[in-house]
Image: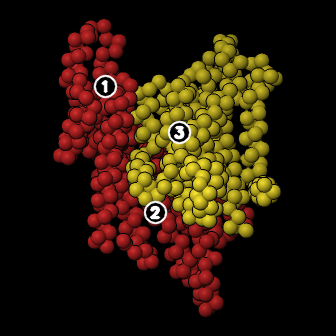
Amino acid sequence: MGRYLLKRIWGMVISFFGITIISFFIINLAPGSPTDLQTDLNPRITPEIIEKLRKHYDLDKPVHVRYIKWLKNLSTLDFGTSLSPDGRKVIDKIKERLPVTVLINLLAMIIIIIVSIPLGLYISINKGKWKERVITVLSFLFYSIPSFWLAILLILLFGIYFHILPISGLKSINYASMNSFEKILDLARHLVTPLIVATLGGIASFSRYVASNFDEALKQDYVTLARIKGVPEGVVIRKHALRNALIPVITILGLSVPGLIGGSVIFETIFAIPGMGQLFFQSVMGRDYPVIMGILVLSSVLTLLGNLLADIGYGLADPRIRYR
Amino acid sequence: MKDRKSYLNLTIKRFCEKKSALVALFFIVALIFLSFSYPLFSKTSPDEINVDRILMPPSLDHWFGTDALGRDVFARVLYGGRISLLVGFVSEGIAIMIGIIIGSISGYFGGRVDNIIMRFTDIMLCFPVFFLILSVIAFVEPSIWNIMIIIGLTGWMSVARLVRGEFLSLREREFVLYERAVGNSNLKIMFKHILPNALNPVIVSAAFGIAGAILTETALSFIGLGVQPPTPSWGNILTQGKDILEIAWWISLFPGLFILFSVLCYNLIGEGLKDALNPRQY
């Protein structure tokens, strides 16, 4: 296990360098310059001022020199300074946004797991009956629905027609004057709609995945053996089939991290949630290069960590897998 | 040759047994036909502005109503269908081409080449794809072609992995050994002899990929970085309608339904192909 971990961590270090290279060069080789937003359409800008600005942001130096400088700063968690008017440190900007996004994605993942495992089991057990058909059709529908369209429909339904849930942001105006119980309740009420949007597609695909794994597991010899031995069907399902069916699910969970984070751009924008996705969108629109690069690096490191956890979990759940 | 034909027949037969997939295929073909032949049977142009009929609800004259500029939403949705289908096909086509090339090189040569290529693929998989797309698209002009290229360039990783997996196992087979022994070039062996045997999972993932690409374009349109108006795409019609949803629900309802429906159809086709091309289940 120790050697395996070392090897994995070494692999992650290499991946990390790859991530920084891609993040840096995608942004810096793209046409346009971060100073465009300040200089374009501004009649008072002269070529000298553009030159000065370029010097100020080190844009006059060759790309690889800038990359190495940026990487050096990264090692001390210094992502540079934002180019937006507030001029704050990138790391501070991300720091206040990251917890919201991580919280929502963690909750989303937990909900996806809690709902789709029993649902997948249900689909598999009722295979061929009308119940399974209905669930399958519904899951295909939810899987195919554009997330923001669903978001708009839910806002209309819950927020405007029924007035039962708040439609944007994370906190009510009087949040500061609430006691801690009310605060949690308030947060939860704000999170209901975004979480529905964030989880429906995942539940749809994930439960189908669980169902097909479970189908496969039920065909295995050890299940037949257990049945022949006279083990009650409930125990066969819970102990023998389900456990084995769930092992590959761990990997898929790890792989779904980037998709969830990427999706946060859409629903954070719609629901005005101050998270990393919203910050990313704002930075892209404002050509805030340091913030874009910082978020690209951080979000992919999150994925790396997710994959590592998934691999370790995989090994813990399945003793047949030896760490090499 | 006879064998190949019977295999194809068998696959088609299996695909047709799955009714949902067949129906979905029928709808997609009908949709493509309708959106391309529309100018033949209707004179309504999708760009025709008419200030006398702004925001009219659906009627016999305008099946899907009119938008804020008095344009016919039905015509726009059908024209938008062309764009959205084009985006789906072309961007997934690009993704598959890149994926096949990278995956077959990686799987065929193995060893160090494989290590390096797969490391790169894994790194690309770490990025949230939507972030990658956004960070590029914001800096280039969001024309249809740029959007298709960028969606394609960021979507090849899963195809590459599938092709690589197939190649890794196929290259050990006797027929490959034979081709090598008679002195065929690597290129010929890879693309003429191995690739046709490795395509099944690619075809399945293509169907799902088209669905994904349509959704991605829609999402890009929603935040204003997709296909730019006045060129209609399902995504941007829907977006134009979202702010006036309460007074003119029809503008965003119909393109939304078309997106939902066509993505659903592609997913069903993919599901059907998966069963048809995987004979192990029978």
Tell us which disc is closer to us: 3 or 1: 3
Q: Which residue is mark 3?
A: B152
Check the residue under mark 3 and report the chain it is in.
B
Q: Number of labelled discs? A: 3
Residue beneath the point at 43% across and 53% down: B113
Residue A88 in percent (x, y) is at: 22, 33
Answer with the quarter of the image where residue A254 lies: bottom left
The crowd level at tag 1 (other Cα within 10 Å; few <14, some 14-19, many 20+) is many
Judge left or right: residue A130 versus residue A218.
right
Q: Which residue is mark 2?
A: A251
Residue B148 in percent (x, y) is at: 55, 33
The crowd level at tag 2 (other Cα within 10 Å; few <14, some 14-19, many 20+) is some
The quarter of the picture where the N terminus of chain B appears is bottom right
**Label 1 residue SS:** loop
Q: Residue flagged by tag 2: what amino acid is it?
A: Thr
Residue beneath the point at 68% across and 26% down: B79
